[in-house]
Image (cartoon, grey):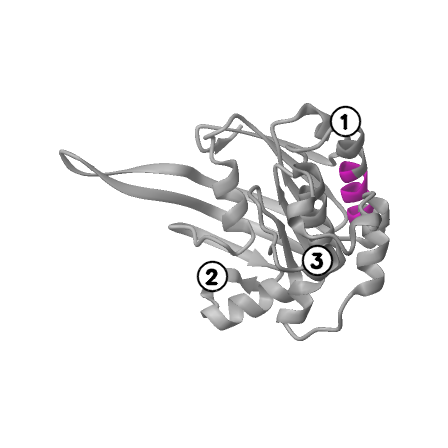
Amino acid sequence: MAVKAENIARRYFRKTGGANYFYAVKPLSLEIEAGEVAVLTGRSGSGKTTLLNMLSGLLAPTEGKVWIDSTDLYSLDDKGLSRLRGERIGVVPQGRSAIDTLTVLENILLPAKLYGRPLPIEAASRWMERLDIANLRDARPAELSGGELRRMAIVRALAQSPDFLFADEPTGDLDDENTSLVLSAFRDYAHQQKKAVFVVTHENDALQYADHIYKMDGGQIM
């Protein structure tokens, strides 16, 4: 079980006098296997989030292919891609993603409800306890700190038990103690449940939890 990128790139067109374009991500190949944590580091603007979005089915590459096992991800129609993402891919986005009218637990269970799957209440409770937000299950997002909102988003992704988990700057709002909680949870999820975890970060603390470390600069993996 693996996600594999083959010569993928993402370029954007712009007009500076005549027609021109620039690469946010230059052609590269990468494979992330089950049972491993891959960490991608690099400065802001280096293309890390763009690469994560292409690997996770959120952004089609302008060149190359992304494979989920034997499935060419972007050969699927919108319905097929949405179904595959709902069944096998989890994403922890960089920005805020809570629905204010729902409780913490309802936010965590929402993806399963939307896709008509059994609600993972047991898994949600276990991960909330692991990331120290169990006491907030009935709270509303407006009552939470930035770090608590971040951990809620992480629990929401983990509770769905995706085969492939993509996390974009998941510890950016967290103190040292909670950063350790999150990164050790990712490592255990990958190693114990044989899942693939891909973490984009600029924090060096994540490196000690990684099986593979990549660095990105100028749209290229160095």
Query: Which mark identifies residue 213?
Result: none
The residue most toward the bottom is: 116
Observer-side mark, 1 or 2, equals 1
Q: Quadrant of residue 37?
A: top right
Disc 1 to disc 2: CB gap under 8 Å: no
Observer-side mark, 2 or 3, equals 3
Q: Residue at x 85, y 62 (%)?
A: 122
Residue 177 % position (x, y): 80, 29
Q: Is residue 23 above or below residue 107?
A: above
Q: CA distance from mark 2 to mark 3?
A: 34 Å
Q: Is residue 89 above or below residue 186?
A: below
Image quadrant containing the N terminus: bottom right
Q: Amino acid at mark 1?
A: Asp
Magenta part of the chain: 182-190
Q: CA distance from mark 3 to mark 1?
A: 26 Å
Q: Residues within 10 Å of mark 1 (few under 14, many from 20)?
A: few
> Mark 3 sits on what residue?
103
Say if the magenta span includes residue 185.
yes
Q: Amino acid at mark 2?
A: Tyr
Which is more N-terminal, label 2 or label 1?
2
> Mark 2 sits on what residue?
74
Disc 3 to disc 1: CB gap under 8 Å: no
> Mark 1 sits on what residue?
176
Residue 146 % position (x, y): 65, 38
Q: Residues within 10 Å of mark 3 (few under 14, many from 20)?
A: some
